[in-house]
């Protein structure tokens, strides 16, 4: 046995407003039929004006902390049996502001005191990167207990006239709590595989707003403040890189694909999930999919899929779980764990 980071809490949050495919079809040259058959998405949630990534991150974080408290239980005198969180890592590509990071504000609003907190930017792979970062800090003894959040509000950076990206992306946040434990416990993160390829940086991008092309003081070239994606090559790379990353992690962990109970992949497109399943030789029942209800929620996608799979009874304690993500950068990453027994608690706030 060795020191490991152990997943011990899970939460998520979606904005109230739901935009159906039919509603999109009233505004754009698209249809429910096209969106469902080409992506598997039926609806997505979008933030209200003024609602930001940190608002969703705080709600998801509060739920994950409540779940960790309920999972740990209470002492006879009613006191919580959990140590305070001493690290917050937030994966997002839609921070509240370009500077400073959004994580310190989230930690402050959750009442976590002066804990170290920072953002991780790896677009749709962000949650896996944040998980690996927090787990490494726990195994290195730098942190004892971490809140890891994936939160994005892509509706705030989409071109209102772009039917492709508006059909796919939705807003949301998902979160987990990690604690120090040992590698033999259910919930222990057993390994990671991470990678990137910057030669594909232009395939998924927001061109303006950074140091290469400021949108202030001069105006950005028209439309360059919006998110753009070159769908077809991204599709191909997503299948290839998630399959390769999954395969190499499975070899490292010593599982074969048939032994994995649930693969929770980044929820970008049902055809991508099926193609990854085919590459790995998986059966349909091994693949978790919630994108019909939430779309592609970027860094929130994997933890929200975990939350929905637990809520629906599809993901059970003892299941061998493989997480795999792919996104802008290009970036990809996978993680493996045996699913632990978790309670859902009531958030204090
Ligand atoms: O999350 C990070 C990683 N992202 C992904 O993994 C996304 C990967 N890419 C995809 O999921 C798919 O490429 C998309 C869903 C983005 C697009 O699906 P596609 O089957 O690859 O479509 P396409 O881009 O090849 O376009 C086919 C046709 C085009 O029309 P023409 O040129 O053939 O006349 C598009 O203009 O479909 C058209 N189209 C649409 N039609 C109706 C594109 N979007 C729409 C739409 N409604 N929403």
Image (cartoon, rainbow, N blue to C red):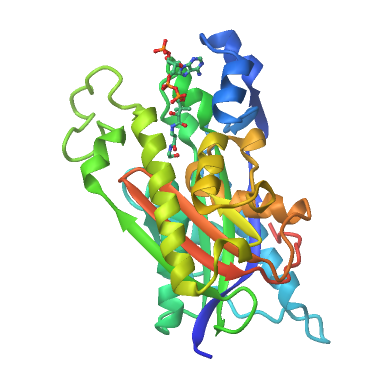
Screen quadrant of the C terminus: bottom right
Image quadrant in which you'd find residue 346: bottom right
Q: Position of residue 1 (x, y in %)?
A: 53, 91
Looking at the image, residue 153 lies above or below residue 249: above
Extreme-front residue of the structure:
281
Residue 348's spot in the image, x, y percent? 71, 61
Q: Residue at x 49, y 66 (%)?
A: 250
The spot of residue 49 in percent (x, y) is 54, 28
Residue at the farthest right position = 76
Considering depth in this image, is 68 or 188 the residue closer to the camera? 188
In-front residue for pair 146/235: 235
Is residue 265 left or right of 192 when viewed as pictured? right
Which residue lies at the image location 43% right of the left edge and 43% below the top edge?
Answer: 239
Q: Residue 179: where, in percent of width, then height?
A: 56, 77
- Above-or-below relation of 169 to 337: above
Q: Quarter containing ligand 1?
A: top left
Q: Residue at x 76, y 67 (%)?
A: 343
Q: Is residue 309 left or right of residue 160?
A: right
Q: How many marks?
A: 0
For this rendering, which residue is in front, 5 or 185? 185
Q: Quadrant of residue 104?
A: bottom left
Instruction: Name the residue: 66% across, 61% down.
Output: 261
Taking the image as drawn, is residue 89 in sight?
no
Asked if residue 69 lies left or right of residue 126, the reply is right
Q: Is residue 155 above or below residue 54?
A: above
Residue 259 shows in the view: yes
């Amino acid at each position: 046995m060795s020191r490991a980071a152990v997943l011990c809490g899970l939460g998520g949050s979606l904005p109230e407003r739901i935009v159906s495919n039919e509603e999109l079809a009233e505004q754009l040259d698209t249809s429910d039929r096209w969106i469902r058959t080409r992506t598997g998405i039926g609806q997505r949630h979008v933030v209200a004006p003024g609602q930001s990534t940190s608002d969703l991150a705080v709600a998801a974080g509060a739920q994950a902390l409540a779940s960790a408290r309920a999972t740990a239980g209470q002492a006879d005198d009613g006191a919580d049996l959990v140590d305070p969180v001493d690290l917050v890592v937030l994966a997002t590509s839609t921070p509240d502001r370009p500077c400073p990071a959004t994580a310190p504000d989230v930690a402050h609003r959750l009442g976590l005191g002066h804990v170290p907190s920072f953002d991780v930017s790896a677009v749709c792979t962000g949650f896996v990167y944040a998980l690996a970062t927090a787990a490494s800090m726990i195994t290195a003894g730098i942190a004892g207990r971490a809140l890891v959040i994936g939160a994005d509000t892509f509706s705030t950076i989409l071109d209102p006239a772009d039917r492709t990206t508006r059909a796919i992306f939705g807003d949301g946040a998902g979160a987990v709590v990690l604690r120090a434990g040992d590698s033999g416990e259910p919930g222990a993160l057993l390994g990671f595989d991470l990678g990137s390829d910057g030669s594909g940086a232009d395939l998924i991008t927001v061109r303006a707003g950074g140091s290469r092309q400021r949108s202030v003081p001069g105006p950005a070239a028209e439309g360059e403040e919006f998110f753009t994606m070159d769908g077809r090559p991204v599709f191909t790379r997503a299948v290839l890189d998630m399959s390769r990353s999954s395969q190499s992690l499975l070899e490292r962990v010593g599982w074969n694909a048939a032994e994995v109970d649930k693969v929770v992949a980044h929820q970008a497109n049902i055809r991508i999930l099926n193609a990854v399943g085919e590459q790995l030789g998986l059966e349909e029942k091994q693949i978790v999919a919630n994108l019909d209800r939430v779309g592609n929620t970027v860094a929130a996608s994997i933890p929200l899929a975990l939350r929905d799979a637990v809520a629906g009874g599809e993901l059970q304690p003892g299941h061998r779980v493989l997480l795999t993500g792919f996104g802008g950068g290009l970036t990809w990453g996978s993680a493996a764990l045996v699913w632990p027994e978790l309670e859902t608690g009531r958030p204090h706030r």
